[in-house]
Amino acid sequence: MNRRLTLTGSVAGAVIVALDGTVLTVAQPALQRDLDASFTQVQWTSTGYLLAVAALLVLAGRLGDRYGHQRVFGVGMLGFGAASAGIGLAPGIGWVIALRVAQGVFGALLQPATLGMLRAAYPPDRLRAPLAARTAAIGLAAAAGPVAGGALVAGPGWRAVFFLNVVPALVFGVLALARPGPRQRDRRPLDLPGALLLAVALACGVHTLVALPEPRWTTTAAGLAAAAAFVVQERRTASPLVPPQLAGSAAVGSALTVLTVASATLSGTLFAGTYVLQYALGLDSFQAALRSLPLAVLMVAAAPGCAVLLRRAGARRTTVTAMAVLALGVLVLSRASGTFALCGGFALLGAGFGTVMVSATHVVVRRAPVESAGVAGGLQQTAMNVGPTLGVAAATALMGPGGGARPALLALAAVAAAGAPAALALPGRSPAGPVDGGREGEEDRSRVSARR
């Protein structure tokens, strides 16, 4: 397997998904006017995508483990690009919503594969740098998305936004399918009942969060029932959707918890921070964007720095420290009013989140056996999709009657700080060398001894 091509494809897939989400936000007002859509319909262009992708990520990862990550990645990229082109040509808002749901399905296929391909291509002790490159690219996409989207909407129009990803998606999809590589070693039968129950549980959970502060309790109850049935199904079946090596791993559970808390904190802070910048401080959207720019810059810079910290300090110390930095960034923003303080708060936010994303993802992917790398990627991506939804819902509730943006930021800082202890279950630095402790560290030392 060509490692450079694999890394390029993984980065391209992650960037395409990240870029699509950021440019859509910019395009929605123009889309609404042009298609004479209601606010609720425009909301469903985001909600429909989110429901589809969150419900299918783990199953998509399992398909990659069984049929090959490059094959699933190729299908996902081609479908994502085709759906994007369809949205750009859509005659009405109904078509846009339907195609966004389809885009979510294909996005669910390609996202876990971007991590599964890296786990299959790189040995565990060399995953830090590829994951750092992937995270840095996501940060760049997040920074460039609003700018590119704004320029396209102001020039050719909102439809041009959806053609932005078409060519790279088709190119990398064709390349992946042209040389798909060998099939994976996982030959366990698919746990379709478990996959269906998990999809229902996640879709209902996300829908409940999106609907806050007025959730539909029937949807919530259905989600809880599906989650309980999924646990029972996983315990009874001979081939569970989530392998016991992952389901029973304290390190993986800790990493997923940290990712969920960190992404919830970031998204909730950005949501509340918008009100502080534009309403409390009276800044226009461009001035607000300039003050938040250090977030993207430090997120990109933190990714390669985290690879060094992981090697020298281990995942536990790196992640606990990064969660503290993330909490400090939110705390600074809750009190900031001047440009210097605002930029400093956003810089701390980017540095903390970028480091957490690399370190926790490294644990999830590294701890997974190669034959279960897709499921591990699906779990990581689920955390990264559910977390932001949870964060925005929490911020909305905190900013409700009697609340405010600054008190909401204080609460989110407390959430980030409370999430730091979860990182204590992550592996530390191995006494024998710069490898995280645990089973993988023993395997790496055995390989070194064998070569000697």
Image: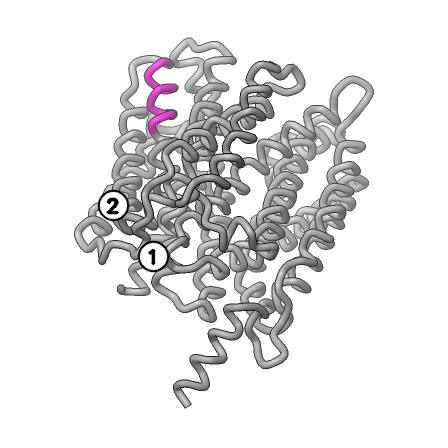
Residue 110 position in % (x across, y down):
35, 43
Q: Label 1's element?
A: helix
Residue 298 visible in rendering = no
Q: Residue at x 62, y 46 (%)?
A: 257
Q: Residue at x 47, y 17 (%)?
A: 42
Q: Residue at x 77, y 46 (%)?
A: 332
Question: What residue occupies the far bottom of the structure in this picture?
Answer: 452
How busy is the neighbourhood of tag 1: few (under 14 within 10 Å), some, or many (20 plus)? some
Left or right relative to 450: residue 408: right
Q: Is residue 80 magenta?
A: no
Residue 286 visible in rendering = yes
Marks 2 and 1, how far apart at CA: 12 Å
Per the picture, the main secondary structure of the magenta-coloured stretch is helix
Residues under numbered marks 2 and 1 in contact, where contact means CB atoms less than 8 Å apart = no
Left or right relative to 50: residue 165: left
Q: Label 2's element?
A: helix
Res. 334 image quadrant: top right
Res. 8 image quadrant: bottom left
Q: Which residues are magenta?
A: 94-102
Q: Residue at x 50, y 47 (%)?
A: 380
Residue 444 position in % (x across, y down):
47, 75
Classify 200 as above or below 417.
above
Q: Residue 8 bears which disc, if any?
A: 1
How busy is the neighbourhood of tag 2: few (under 14 within 10 Å), some, or many (20 plus)? many
Residue 23 position in % (x across, y down):
44, 33
Q: Residue 173 bears which disc, if any?
A: 2
Residue 366 position in % (x across, y down):
48, 61
Left or right relative to 112: residue 229: right
Q: Residue 364 bears which disc, if any?
A: none
Q: Is residue 98 magenta?
A: yes
